[in-house]
Image (cartoon, rainbow, N blue to C red):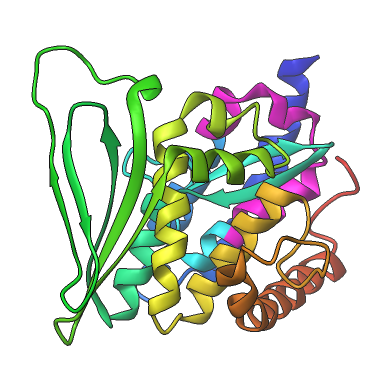
Amino acid sequence: MAEKQSKSLVQVIDTQAHKIRDILPEGMNSEKDAQRVIRLARLAIVRNPDLLKCSPISVVEAIMSASQLGLEIASPIGGAHLVPFKGKCQMIPDYRGLIRLALRKGDCRKLVAREVYEGDMFHVIQGTTEMIEHVPLLGDEPRRDEDITGFYAVATLTDGITVHEYASRGDVDKIRGRSAAGNKGPWKTDYAAMGKKTLIKRVLKWLDLSPDLAMAIEYDTRGETGYSTSSGDRDTEESVEEDMAEQARQAQKELSENLEQARREELIGEDA
């Protein structure tokens, strides 16, 4: 049964190759690029069979959402992930995908996020000259998520200005507690990566966001909380996403129009 479902879903995805190619960003929209998207989508399904329980149209929409942003799914270099949630598939960017989009716009020269562990030398200096000093404690033993004490992100803009954000583990865990998937998925399996993404999103408030980056943050927030950044039912502490909402809604409107056109052309079967 699962094999039949997998074959059916792959067939649906295969029919969308030309649509995927059309919405890929300029310079990444060759036939070869489109076929790579299809291959990575197949790999994501193999790695996560729960995607077979999602409606096929939601899987295709998630793939097309990532494609429009130029983010690869299930790529070794990071980008975005397909995540099943209540019978539907969601596209959620990872922290490396957000970094890639920020650097692509051109007004950010460098953007990094790090975790801080017990035993590291770490100082946050504020005042007229603000900076972060971090000297990791090197050793032979692998570092564990349980030993993380905090996270930070640093952005260097093209004009040479450097901005940073820091949050303790307790602060990040509060955000995790508000997530719809705080006790499963990436928060459980990739805690360090999720913590870094949290700080990346905070430091991005210093940047002039491109529509693609704003839309990626919208997708991430929707996946984390179960509602969009435009919803009033959210914590005011997350003001970063609130400031980005209007840009994200405009970008989302454009994507929705593209997907509606695909439906009208009857290329996607009803839960084939």
* Quadrant including the C terminus: top right
Tell me residue 98's x, y (percent). 42, 60
Residue 18 seen anywhere in this rendered image of the structure: no
The magenta segment: 43-65
Tell me residue 191's x, y (percent). 46, 32
183 displayed left or right of 227: left
In the displayed structure, 254 sits above or below 266; it is: below
Q: Residue at x 85, y 62 (%)?
A: 266
In the displayed structure, 7 sits above or below 105; it is: above
Q: Residue at x 14, y 82 (%)?
A: 160
**In the picture, residue 244 is in which quadrant?**
bottom right
In the displayed structure, 77 sits above or below 221; it is: above
* Quadrant including the N terminus: top right
Q: Is residue 261 magenta?
A: no
252 displayed left or right of 96: right
Camera-nearest residue between 67 and 135: 135
Q: Residue at x 68, y 49 (%)?
A: 223
